[in-house]
Image: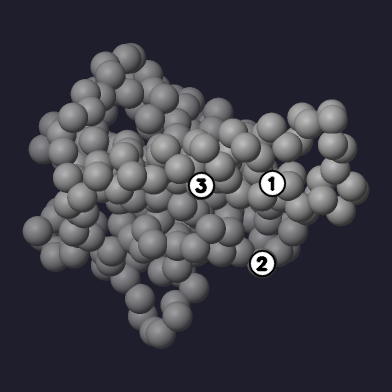
């Protein structure tokens, strides 16, 4: 059970964590062959005795890029298994969540070529807490990118920053949605956040675990209809502050 808008309790289905031991074994088995393949591809790229043709070099370069991506996925899988096994200790550094989110948003602008813009609005600071700055930064980066990927331009996505205080406890709230849907997304019943999105690797499952590891929550607005664009294209994140 979770507390919804207005404080009422609502059911939110949380995705089941994968078996940490199975993930750890998979990481171990994948890491060595992936590193070997990557090493041989780099050797071919640097080979001066038997130069590659332009066509061959292009194919080797593309294969090496894919191998780098595969190795990055293995690293994400390793991080996932450690988080689920409780083997990761989140660092404790002083930060302002609102400032951090704005800094991340500045770097998430590759969708501009589709006329999909990201703007941060609301409170500029005041969301102080202690937490793992690097992991929180990566989590917000993944969340912002996931929402922007869903949009076809021209459109402006807003990341609105708010503070809620209930029973003497303050919470930082981030509502990420299209400009015209920010309040609608916030007011809706809570639904599960879809972290299994193509093209995002394991970034979103990791983001959820990092948010929850800091005592926060992440969800999407419940759907009013099939393929509801507000549900798919919005997310709300809360984190305790103070």
Q: Where 102 sits versus 182, above or below?
A: above
> At x 49% / y 54%, what residue is drawn?
200
Question: Cα distance, mark 2 to mark 1?
Answer: 13 Å
Graded by Cα atoms within 10 Å as few (under 14), some (14 to 19) or many (20 or more), the crowding at tag 2 reads few
Res. 138 image quadrant: top left
Residue 25 quadrant: top left
The answer to whether the residues at label 3 and label 1 have Cβ atoms under 8 Å apart is: no
Judged left or right of residue 202, residue 63 is: right
On residue 70, which mark appears?
Answer: 3
Q: Nearer the viewer, mark 3 or mark 1?
A: 3
Judging by the rendered image, the residue that carries numbered circle 1 is: 110
How many tags in the picture? 3
Visible residue check, residue 147? yes
Distance from the alpha carbon under mark 3 to that under mark 1: 22 Å
- Quarter of the view holding residue 186: bottom left
- The image position of residue 172, as x and y in percent, is 32, 36
Label whose residue precedes the other's in the sequence (3 or 1):
3
Q: Secondary structure at mark 1?
A: helix
Q: CA distance from mark 3 to mark 2?
A: 28 Å
Residue 152, numbered label: 2
Q: Position of residue 148 (x, y in %)?
A: 58, 55
């Amino acid at each position: 059970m979770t507390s919804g808008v207005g404080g009422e309790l609502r059911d939110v289905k949380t995705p089941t964590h994968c078996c940490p031991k199975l993930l750890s074994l998979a990481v171990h088995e994948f890491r060595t062959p992936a590193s070997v393949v990557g090493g041989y591809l780099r050797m071919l790229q640097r080979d001066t005795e038997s130069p590659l043709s332009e066509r061959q070099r292009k194919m080797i370069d593309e294969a090496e890029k894919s191998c780098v991506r595969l190795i990055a996925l293995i690293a994400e899988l390793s991080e996932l298994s450690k988080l689920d096994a409780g083997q990761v200790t989140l660092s404790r550094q002083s930060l302002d969540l609102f400032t951090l989110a704005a800094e991340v948003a500045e770097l998430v602008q590759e969708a501009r070529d589709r006329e999909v813009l990201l703007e941060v609005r609301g409170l500029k600071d005041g969301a102080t807490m202690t937490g793992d700055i690097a992991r929180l930064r990566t989590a917000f980066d993944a969340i912002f990118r996931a929402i922007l990927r869903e949009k076809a331009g021209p459109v402006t996505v807003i990341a609105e920053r708010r503070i809620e205080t209930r029973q003497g406890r303050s919470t930082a709230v981030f509502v990420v949605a299209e400009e015209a849907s920010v309040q609608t997304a916030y007011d809706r019943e809570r639904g599960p956040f879809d972290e299994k999105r193509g093209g995002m690797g394991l970034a979103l499952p990791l983001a959820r675990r990092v948010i929850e590891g800091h005592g926060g929550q992440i969800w999407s607005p419940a759907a009013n209809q099939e393929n509801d664009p507000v549900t798919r294209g919005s997310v709300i994140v809360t984190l305790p502050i103070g």
